[in-house]
Image (cartoon, rainbow, N blue to C red):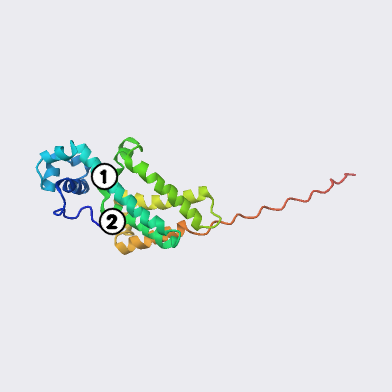
Amino acid sequence: MNDRDPLAPADDLDPRQRLVVAAIDQIEKHGIGQLTVRKLAAAAGVNIAAVNYYFRSKEALVAAALEGSIRNMLSDSEDFLARMPGDPLEALSGLLGYYLEGGMRYPNVGRALLHDAFHADDYSGPFPKLFAPVMDRLRDLVRAAVPGLEERAAARRVVAALSAVFFPTFFAGLYEGLSALGSPADRLAYARELARQTLAPAAVPEPAAPAPPRGRPQKRG
């Protein structure tokens, strides 16, 4: 798993890497709509010309920074998914907790990853495309972990679990009064509860009612 904090000091990085880290930092602090080349260069400790030299444009720099954050997320997700066959509850709790903690720490980066989805109902961008296989794999792993669970039921459980994680990260203020996710311990307990629900035994279908006996109709006198 990549343990580097994307907002950590970048003194040990080359100018291109510093610009990428600065872009993530500025997106989180001010939102993607407030980015300027001047702010990015100042945050990275380079001159403005470096943006054009390394990336040709601010938009290309932002795209590279966001794609890098997606790749890190996918790599970390893979670590959790790979552990699911051996210990489904711990691995799924860790995965959901990772998404929740990351979303709560960096909400503006999360919104930037889904900027076109939020503003134009456009899901053709990098994040929706790259995250779709993760959801498919998670559905299959949940189904494998729960005997008797049908594919569509497993898919519904994945939708419910991911929705329960991502919605509070994008709209944290909506639930602020409940104080349910205010601490790392609260978020860990929440993720574990979601994992338990997702991996709960499949519902046993009720047996069909016996058909009424088919005797001869009685003659009426």
Q: Residue at x 40, y 44 (%)?
A: 132
State how far apart marks 1 and 2 are (Cα).
Answer: 16 Å
Mark 1 or mark 2, which is nearer to you?
2
Whether residue 171 can be seen here: no
Q: Earlier in the sequence, mark 1 or mark 2?
A: 2
Query: Which is nearer the eye, 82 or 45?
Result: 82
Q: Name which residue type carries label 1.
A: Leu
State which quarter of the image contains the N terminus. Answer: bottom left
Q: Relative to residue 220, is residue 18 drawn left or right? A: left
Residue 77 % position (x, y):
36, 53
Residue type at numbered disc 2:
Asn
Q: Residue at x 16, y 51 (%)?
A: 13
**Res. 39 mark:** none
117 is higher (above) or lower (below) than 17:
above
Residue 66 is marked as 1
Residue 176 appears at what percent x and percent y? 30, 55
- Badge 2: residue crowd in 10 Å (few <14, some 14–19, many ≥20): few
Q: Quadrant of the C terminus?
A: top right
Q: Is residue 139 left or right of residue 190?
A: right
Furthest residue in direction bottom, as rendered? 185
Q: Which mark is residue 2?
A: 2
**Residue 155 picture location, percent across and down:** 47, 48
Of all residues, the one furthest to the left in this rendering is 47
Nearest the viewer among 105 and 91 is 91
Of residues 110 and 46, the one drawn nearer to the viewer in this rendering: 46
